């Protein structure tokens, strides 16, 4: 009886603590109450449903246009949230006080379940140790050595498209999202992991590529459920918990687990092959895809040579493989798809870019016909097209942080509080959810000017206005928040840039791009993805034709404008 009473008391105390921890914001006043913000959507969901909705672009744009770079939001059950895209505040959050504003607990726990303890599932010293080991393998020096691998895969993509359009005198409709996804997977496979996933021969992607590409659309329907993870206890063994997930009455939850299992099995297979080759010696390594110059081979060798306290254990190395695959495939392929769609919508830009690429290939390529790294990354108009697309249509719209203690955050400009007084800094209590508005920062008219909503690659061909340079946006890439900043900035952003530029060069040198005539909408998700209106399947059909120098496509194409693309 005494044990039963003790157990009941423990349960009551635990429940009371959880209720107090979550609901205290409802009953205690906060300095955030004085920050202007939109009306609460509902007590149950707050504004969270609006900001996570796949059609939530209008709400994100409303926050960008209506509020002075910061807005108070309501979270589920009265929980306070803060939406931030003020450059000075962002510098404090992602750089200066980055360990006060940590990744959200639900994000870390979900990524640990999805990928294992990799770079996207660790915080603090654990994350810094992994990052220290990984940073050198993403250096520019290593990127230079990957050009031949990228070029070989680009040639395979070129041949695959050629095989599908050569028999027709008219442009052929192809799902370019699928082709960009397969290409991105093969690029991270060979250059990143020394492994070939897809020879780019078949008409459709295989089970593994399909599984990786299905993650984004599947997560849309469980975004709210993921936020419950920190409050769920780890009951029983991992095997028992897996069984519980298999029985969970939600198809998307079960589907997410199945996709994670597929990715994990392939990651283990890749890891074992790499380790086996390294154990057999240099000759075995050079016989692998990538000849030992891939990121994973370099990482494994560095890990073997590292001091014991710096070594990454096997489960963390396997987790990096899953992380590389997902992060490199989904974001870059969708960014490439958006770039192709915009080029199809703007034939004059397409023709100008093609001219630059062809002239560079004629005059500056090496003996093999390839552009070297330095020439490729410095083609001015190609660089401008990539930068402008990643500014206006960043693959990730926003990310979440949580304060681990009370914090004070300065602002670029004071804002007027609800009480009418000027607010010069944000006083943010512990356990506040921060929404970093990546897309809002990139479209901020106070920084980028009144034409911030226009896709204008030419803006990058002249010195940027003082409003941009003076803002000191803390992103690692080109005054943008697209790849974030600080210790959790995208570690592979140089890899992604190289990938985008090579694929665009390969396609525009041989093919023309035009809209298919089908209306495409972009869905707001962890990583934005396109669908044909009326369908839930991620796809982006376009008309692809053979490029004939005597036929300029300018003024001959018609279709959707960028404003109608969505997002």
Image (spheres, rainbow, N blue to C red):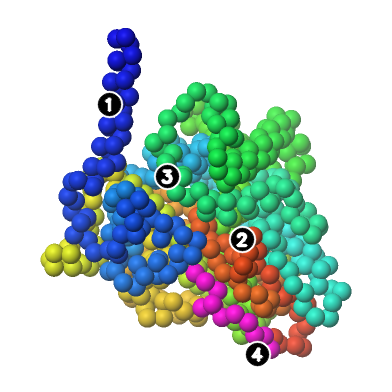
* Mark 4: secondary structure: loop
In primary-sequence order, the first of circles 3 and 4 is 3
Using the image, determine if residue 507 lies above or below residue 551: above
Which residue position is annotated with label 2? 536
Q: Nearer the viewer, residue 339 or 290?
A: 339
In primary-sequence order, the first of circles 4 and 2 is 2
Overall secondary structure of the magenta section: loop
Figure quadrant of residue 73: bottom left
Residue 556 within the magenta-colored segment of the rendering = yes
Is residue 151 among what the camera can see?
no
Residue 43 within the magenta-colored segment of the rendering = no
| Residue 309, horizontal then vertical, whole percent | 46, 28
Please state if 545 lies on the left or on the right of 310 as rendered.
right
Please state if 297 lies on the left or on the right of 133 as rendered.
right
Q: Which residues are magenta?
A: 555-567
Which-is-in-front pick, marks 3 and 4?
A: 3
User: What residue is shown at x 69% (from left), y 51% (from top)?
Assistant: 209
Which-is-in-front pick, marks 2 and 3?
A: 2
Discs 2, 1 touching: Cβ within 8 Å: no
Discs 3, 4 touching: Cβ within 8 Å: no
* Mark 3: secondary structure: loop
Please state if 474 lies on the left or on the right of 251 as rendered.
left
* Mark 1: secondary structure: helix
In primary-sequence order, the first of circles 1 and 3 is 1
Label 3: how many Cα within 10 Å (few below 14, some 14–19, many 20+): some
Which residue position is annotated with label 1? 13
Which residue position is annotated with label 4? 555
The image's mark for residue 227 is 3
């Amino acid at each position: 009886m005494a044990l039963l009473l003790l157990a009941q008391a423990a349960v009551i105390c635990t429940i009371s603590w959880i209720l107090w921890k979550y609901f205290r914001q409802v009953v205690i006043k906060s300095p955030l109450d004085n920050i202007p913000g939109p009306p609460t959507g509902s007590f149950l969901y707050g504004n969270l449903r609006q900001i996570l909705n796949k059609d939530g672009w209008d709400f994100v744009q409303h926050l960008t246009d209506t509020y002075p770079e910061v807005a108070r939001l309501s979270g589920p059950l009265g929980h306070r949230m803060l939406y931030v895209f003020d450059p000075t505040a962002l510098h404090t959050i992602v750089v200066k006080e980055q360990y006060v504003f940590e990744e959200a607990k639900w994000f870390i726990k979900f990524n640990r379940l999805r990928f294992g303890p990799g770079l996207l599932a660790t915080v603090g010293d654990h994350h810094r140790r992994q990052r220290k080991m990984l940073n050198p393998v993403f250096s520019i020096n290593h990127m230079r050595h990957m050009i031949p691998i990228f070029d070989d895969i680009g040639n395979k993509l070129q041949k695959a498209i050629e095989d599908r359009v050569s028999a027709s005198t008219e442009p052929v409709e192809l799902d370019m999202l699928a082709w960009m996804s397969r290409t991105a997977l093969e690029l991270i496979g060979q250059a990143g992991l020394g492994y070939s996933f897809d020879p780019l021969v078949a008409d459709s992607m295989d089970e593994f590529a399909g599984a990786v590409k299905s993650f984004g659309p599947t997560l849309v329907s469980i975004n709210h459920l993921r936020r419950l993870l920190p409050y769920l206890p780890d009951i029983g063994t991992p095997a028992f918990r897996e069984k519980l997930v298999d029985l969970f009455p939600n198809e998307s939850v079960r589907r997410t687990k199945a996709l994670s299992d597929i990715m994990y099995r392939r990651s283990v297979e890749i890891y074992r092959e790499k380790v086996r080759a390294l154990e057999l010696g240099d000759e075995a390594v050079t016989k692998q895809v990538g000849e030992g110059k891939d990121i994973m081979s370099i990482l494994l060798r560095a890990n073997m040579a590292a001091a014991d306290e710096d070594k990454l254990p096997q489960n963390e190395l396997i987790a990096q493989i899953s992380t590389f695959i997902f992060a490199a495939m989904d974001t870059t392929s969708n960014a490439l798809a958006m770039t192709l769609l915009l080029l199809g919508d703007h034939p004059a830009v397409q023709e100008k870019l093609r001219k630059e690429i062809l002239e560079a290939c004629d005059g500056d390529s090496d003996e093999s016909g390839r552009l070297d790294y330095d020439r490729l990354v410095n083609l001015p108009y190609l660089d401008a097209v990539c930068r402008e697309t990643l500014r206006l249509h960043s693959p990730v719209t926003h990310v979440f942080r949580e304060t681990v203690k009370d914090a004070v955050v300065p602002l670029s400009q004071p804002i007027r509080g609800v009480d009418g007084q000027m607010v010069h800094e944000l006083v943010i209590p512990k356990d506040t959810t921060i929404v970093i508005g990546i897309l809002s920062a990139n479209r901020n008219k106070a920084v980028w000017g009144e034409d911030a909503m226009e896709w204008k690659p030419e803006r990058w061909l002249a010195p940027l206005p003082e409003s941009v340079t003076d803002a000191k946006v803390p992103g690692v890439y080109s005054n943008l928040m697209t790849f974030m900043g600080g210790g959790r900035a995208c570690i592979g952003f140089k890899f992604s840039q190289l990938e985008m530029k090579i694929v665009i060069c390969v396609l525009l040198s041989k093919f023309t791009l035009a809209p298919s005539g089908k209306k495409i909408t972009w869905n707001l998700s962890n990583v934005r993805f396109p669908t044909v209106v009326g369908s839930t399947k991620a796809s982006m059909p376009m008309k692809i034709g053979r490029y004939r120098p005597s036929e300029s496509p300018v003024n001959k194409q018609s279709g959707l404008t960028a404003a109608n693309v969505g997002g």
